[in-house]
Amino acid sequence: MSIPAASILDFAIPQTRQTVTAKDAILYALSVGYGSQPLDASHLRYLYEADLLTAPTLANVVAHSGPWMKQVGVDWSQVVHAEHRLTMHRQIPVDAPLVSSARSLSVADRGVGKGMFVAFERVVSLAATDEPVATIIQVNACRGDGGCGSAGRPPEPLPPVPNRQPDASHQLHITEDAALLYRLNGDQNPLHVDPAAAKSGGFARPILHGLCTFGHAGYALARMAGGSELALLGAIAARFTAPAFPGDMLEFEMWRTGEDIRFRCVAPSRGSTVLDNGVARLA
């Protein structure tokens, strides 16, 4: 039985709260690549509580709304991340209460047995002043649902990357324990740790969290755009086009286009594009 699109759009996504500690921020940084150069001063600022900086993509896991789609009847075992957009308004603070408010934006139905795309927006704010810290727009592909009809207005499509050689590229090795470490940030979906759950979801083995790949993209862009220092991103967005796996060697390609940075991520060993239509901007 299909889920009415209106029931998704009208669902009151629970508000969530979190106070990020230095330990939370450091764990996140370690889980998305910042620990690869621990003796470099610009990396150490994300890894050491003295004069700590928080990674911009940390906002993706702060006060997360969790698997709320299960509450409206979506088959959660068949949900994968399709697209993600993050805009930072200020750095994620440590030891300051934060609140996250979310709302559904759209349902794009592909038909019975063909799935649907659900877009929702989440705003993370300072609890004390309601000042926005980050705005996130996420699109989930609900592969086990469909036939519900479309509703709302989906986000504008992300533009393709330039049709020329990239201006820079950077390779990152994803460790075999990457998903095991990343799930400690709060996303404990068994798809990323349990071989049986992964097989049930249509994958030969547990896949990397989409936002873990996205976090590595943020780190790779910070390295490529910053020269001898790590650049600070103010916004980053991309489509998820294929899964990445623990143990992968990923190559991040970057183009400069005016104020914007365009990027994609490929897994050369499989000839697959993992992230595409990437857009970022420095803070």
Image (spheres, grey):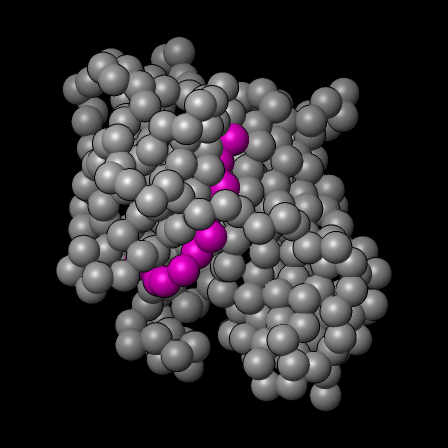
What number of labels is visible? 0
Q: Position of residue 2 (x, y in %)?
A: 72, 83
User: In the image, 44: left or right of 14?
Assistant: left
User: In the image, 129: left or right of 202?
Assistant: right
Q: Nearer the viewer, residue 268 or 124?
A: 268
Q: Furthest residue to the top?
A: 51
Q: Nearer the viewer, residue 117 or 209?
A: 117
User: In the image, 183: left or right of 129?
Assistant: left
Look at the magenta stretch and give its main secondary structure.
strand
Quadrant of residue 172 within the rendered picture: top left
Q: Residue at x 55, y 42 (%)?
A: 85
Q: Is residue 258 visible?
A: yes
Q: Is residue 169 above or below residue 272?
A: above
Q: Is residue 278 above or below residue 105?
A: above
Decide whether residue 240 is among the magenta residues. Answer: yes
Quadrant of residue 215 within the rendered picture: top left
Q: Position of residue 152 (x, y in %)?
A: 78, 58
User: In the image, 246: left or right of 18?
Assistant: left
Q: Furthest residue to the front?
A: 163
Q: Residue at x 73, y 42 (%)?
A: 101
Q: Residue at x 21, y 36 (%)?
A: 170
Q: Nearer the viewer, residue 172 or 268?
A: 268
Decide whether residue 213 is among the magenta residues. Answer: no
What is the quadrant of the N terminus in the image?
bottom right
Q: Which residues are magenta?
A: 235-244
Q: Nearer the viewer, residue 89 or 109?
A: 109
Q: Position of residue 29 (x, y in %)?
A: 36, 33
Q: Position of residue 155 (x, y in %)?
A: 65, 50
Q: Is residue 61 visible?
A: no
Q: Residue at x 31, y 35 (%)?
A: 254
